[in-house]
Amino acid sequence: MVTEIKQVKQVLTSGIKPIWCAGCGDFGVQAALVKALTDLGIDRSNVVLVSGIGCSSAMPHPFSTYGVHSLHGRLLPVASGLKLANDDLTVIGTGGDGDGYGIGVGHLIHTARRNIDMTYIVMNNEIYGLTTGQASPTSFIGAKTKSTPFGDIENPLNPIALALSAGATYVARAFSGDPMHMAEMIKNGIQHKGFAIIDVFSPCVTFNNVNTYDWYRPRVYKLEQAGHDSSDISKAMEKALETDKTKWEKIPIGLFYKTQKPVYSEMDITLKNGPLIKQPDPDKTKINSILEEYL
Amino acid sequence: MSSVTIRIAAANGDGVESSGALLIKVATRNGFQVFGYRGYQSIIRGGHVWYQIRLSDGKLHSHGDGIDILIALNQDAIKNQKSHLNDNAVVIYDPSKTNVTELDSNRYRLTPIPLLDIAVKQSGDPIMRNVAAIGAALGFIGIDIKVFDDVIRKMFGRKGDKVVNDNINVATAGYNSPGVTKAFDIKGDGKQRYSMDGNSAFAFGAYTSGCKFYAAYPMTPASGILQWFAQHQDKGVLFKQTEDEIAAINMAIGAASAGVRAMCGTSGGGFSLMVEGLGLAGMLEVPLVVAESQRTGPSTGLPTKTEQADLLFVMHSSQGEFPRIVMAPRSVEECFYVGKEALNLAERYQCPVVVMLDLFLSEHVESVDGFDFDSIGIDRGKVAAPNPNGGRFKRYELSADGISPRSFPGMPGLEFVSPSDEHNEYGDLVSDALSGIDEHVEMRRKMHSKRMSKIDTMLMNEKCFFPEVSNEGADHFLMTFGSTAQPATEAIGMLNEAGLNVGLITFKYLMPLDQEKTKQILSGKKIIDVECNYTAQLAYVVKANTGMDITDRILKYDGEAITPGEIAMQAADIIKKQK
């Protein structure tokens, strides 16, 4: 969403306190999102934060923007409906790994391939926090959780590789331990015209004692500083698989891939005429021409 | 009123559907009223399919009980259709492909026509034999072949002269075949009518009322609605085919939250996937129209057959409680108006409205005189005024009638979060960390009561949530809902002709019901419940709402559409016992 960004002074907080534990990675995401929206100066009445269910899906409440706190796994269809109905809106999805990579993973693939112009932030803590600590689709093999007391035996899903293969046109990763970098990733994602996904390592301080801030810090490095060519999908895929290759010793964050493709609203025959909400109801001529088909 | 019933029967791929559609166009153009219903299977080639088209000089309510003209395009057609033939029925067949030795030539008018020869000679295309048969059928009914020419030019004009001329030449040769003469005393009134199926009428009605968004995953028999919106995307309505029905309903909820009129649709299996989303619409108080076109059975069932067995499921789908409206249009024409009305009700009461169709209603074609586009205006319900004092907007204000003004993203000063959790007037959660604390316990009670009080508001304001009665003074009544109202209407004509004074009670609205008024309407009447399911679900609804037990029942659940003759015959037996 690059059009019509004008600086407005506004308070972005609603005064509602999030439910997160002290030290939760989601606070870092909140701070980064506030900074991104403030820097971009998008009118808060044109912003819709759409979440699913899970700790991270509480994200819209502390904001004074519009928001929909929807069902578990269904934030992308709800967000898609909002954006398809009103293309003038800045629509940002905020959910977790269980929400987006587990129960809702089908929607991720299809929303990415549609290239709907919106931003999706996935707070990935490799655990189900709100349900008090069961394995998630990104939990590591061997992870001992309430649902895998003998160790997780399923391969973790690779969200970056999945997003790339599904056709996402902006694929990035951030870490809650570096909110300033994350704010850049989010800001660029919002400004990107197309479907942008930002996978965020957002540590759960209560139920995941493996993937902690201290575990991440020595392992993460920034692609921007490593000479990565983010316009090359093969190189992006290579970087996406680096965590598998190095057994998580080296974890790239930053922009993996960015490309420009026509967005859904430029291709859709109805939306070519402008935002749906601004289109008039059918007049008598249109109605009668349809009726004629049935003669 | 007199009528002629034609059934074209063949294998999939023989052009049964297109020749049926052609015959319907020709008949309506000739001033006949029509009613067409297809019997088909979930296969693309082969098998056995038929299209039954009934023509009449008066309003029709069903595709009829027996066949007057059978177009048998293969041997299976003779075998499978002979039990449906009326006495003196005309049987059009090609002697080179089909033998009719199993049919009694004294009882039926067996008419051999070299359909294949005609098709090949006149067009070079053997598939055109069905057009030769249509030509012959027109001759038996006495429809001027010139009308056929006009229709063909309109339907196929853009495909070029060869297609048009081939069709006309083949049909004319069939029409002029030896043995083809006018055999039925019937004449159209010359009035021009439209022919449409229930799915198209519903979609068209919604479109004329400003429906801007339709999301769906393909599923018979709701796919016709999907195709209607797909075909008319260039006329200011967005159609989205989704990855599944879960996405369809949630996208429609997103679109409705943004402020456009939005719908989704499916059959029972897809509706099963939509159920959680239905509850979301209830909780968020988002206006949403869902079409549920029923087919036979649970699971995959009979995908191409009809039933009315999803009523209780739809009424009770989703966990928890929330207001919803369930409607069941009773004819193709009513599908159009229900499309308009459902959108108004959804926005007026900010709740889901489920429109119950079934394969019979979705897919049968009826002639209609036309529509009154202005009879139902557009009511967008309560929309918030600008918020001058700058405080936080109370989207879920505890209003006296339960309806709180909506705002849409983009409206400055009216921002709020729409939450699937229980919430307060601002949309802040009272779940999680706050649940169980006294003031939030109280808020849950108040907010749930607010939502539920919309049911009282509906009942008070709308004055429609009760059954309709025709022939109030009758001795006996058939009672039904949705599409079965049509064959029941015709059955009543038969019963009355047989000297019985029978009236009709039909439910267009199933939920909510005005219990007092419904009880008052049904009280003191001898009632026979007629529905297409095993468990008499309408009778269950009536009992739950009125305490009245309707124990005389006519129930059909074999997948085929119930016919007037079936209803009349069973009703006559029951009436004998009721006396």
Image: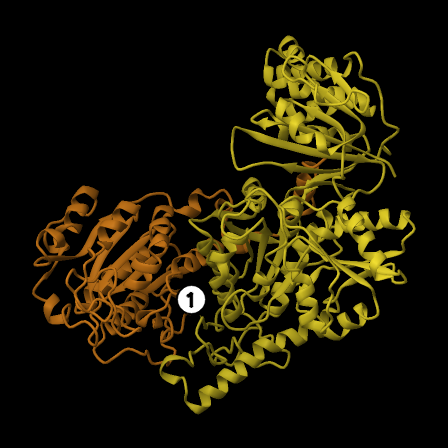
Chain colours: A orange, B yellow
Query: Which is more toward the observer, A199 or A140?
Result: A140
Looking at this view, name the residue that lies furthest to the bottom: B438
B514 is higher (above) or lower (below) than B1: below
Query: Which is more toward the observer, B551 or B176?
Result: B551
Q: Is residue B380 visible?
A: no
* Image position of B240 (left or right of B96): left
Residue A18, image quadrant: bottom left
Query: Which is more toward the observer, B484 or A272?
Result: B484
Task: Return the residue at label 1.
Answer: A70
Residue A36: image location, x then y, percent: 29, 65
Tell me the amino acid under the disc marked 1.
Ser
Assess disc 1: are there few (<14), some (14-19) or many (≥20) residues with their C-alpha within 10 Å of its C-alpha: many
Query: Which is more toward the observer, A194 or B573?
Result: B573
Q: Which chain does the residue under circle 1 lie in?
A: A
Residue A238: image location, x then y, percent: 15, 46
Q: Residue at x 25, y 72 (%)?
A: A133
* Image position of B298 (left or right of B85): left
Q: Residue at x 69, y 50 (%)?
A: B336
Residue B521: image location, x then y, percent: 80, 69
Residue B572: image location, x then y, percent: 83, 52
* Image position of B22 (left or right of B369): left
Q: Secondary structure at mark 1?
A: loop
B406 is higher (above) or lower (below) than B141: below
* Image position of A1 (left or right of A279): left
Looking at this view, name the residue that lies furthest to the right: B499
Q: Quadrant of the C terminus of chain B?
A: bottom right
Q: Residue at x 35, y 66 (%)?
A: A41
